[in-house]
Amino acid sequence: MADGPLTPDTSETPAAQPTRVGLVDDDSLVRAGLSMILGADPTLTVVGEAGDGADAVELVQRHRPDVLLMDVRMPRMDGIAATRAVTALPSAPRIIMLTTFDMDEYVFEALEAGASGFLLKDTPPADLISAVHVVARGDAMLSPGVTRRMLAHFSHAAPSAAPARHPGIELLTEREREVLGAVGAGLSNAQIGGRLFMSEATVKAHVSKIFAKLDCTNRVQIAIIAYEAGLSDLDTPLD
């Protein structure tokens, strides 16, 4: 007997869920502005707000955002302490620090505590939305130029601090150390590839191995390790 006609599959692939965003700032007008900007993107949804760092922990536990926009200076618990507290939680969200200061040592401390990047509060709306998407994918939200300026600022703020060498550096190959130094200098993957004569895909593969060997989760952390080990060349010119 011949087979009957096939019934067409009318099921649809479920639509991707919007990226869940939490807002932490002691200024309600700032929170309202951020919420309005992010609400213009249908792939983003603001799931909760908090007025200080202490409430940020409760926000994360209750609403489970994917990304948290966190002010640096707040009452009760500032953004740095809140970042440490939030990143210690299970399935912690990615954190973008918000600041009115162009380059602030407190921002460095927050990045070292586990934040994925920082933005100025006057960042254009399109760049803010783009930053949330970048961080939600697991990347660091620091441009090469900002990375360099951040590390240069820190080195001037603490010139007497002795560099601490991360034990995982001993596990890196010579090529991986070159890539680590380039990341520490603030170079993008494309710039690293051009400087070290590698494809961008090869650079990404090296960076992934560096993440694993140094037990890091984002590019900011390996840039910090490169700086502290004295491997980042802040005088290397950007292409």
Image (cartoon, rainbow, N blue to C red):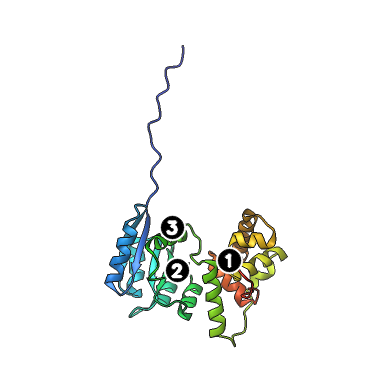
Instruction: Please tell me which residue lies in front, 128 or 16.
Output: 128
Q: Is residue 20 visible?
A: yes
Q: Residue at x 51, y 61 (%)?
A: 139
Neighbourhood count class around disc 1 (C-alpha, 10 Å): few under 14, some 14–19, many 20 upward: few
The quarter of the displayed image where residue 228 is located: bottom right
Q: CA distance from mark 3 to mark 2?
A: 19 Å
Q: Secondary structure at mark 2?
A: helix
Q: Position of residue 91 (x, y in %)?
A: 44, 61
Neighbourhood count class around disc 3 (C-alpha, 10 Å): few under 14, some 14–19, many 20 upward: some
Q: Is residue 88 visible?
A: no
Q: Amino acid at mark 3?
A: His
Q: Which mark is residue 87?
A: 2
Q: Amino acid at mark 1?
A: Asp
Task: From the image, state whether disc 3 or disc 2 is nearer to you.
Answer: 3
Query: Which residue matches tag 1?
Result: 215
Q: Secondary structure at mark 1?
A: loop
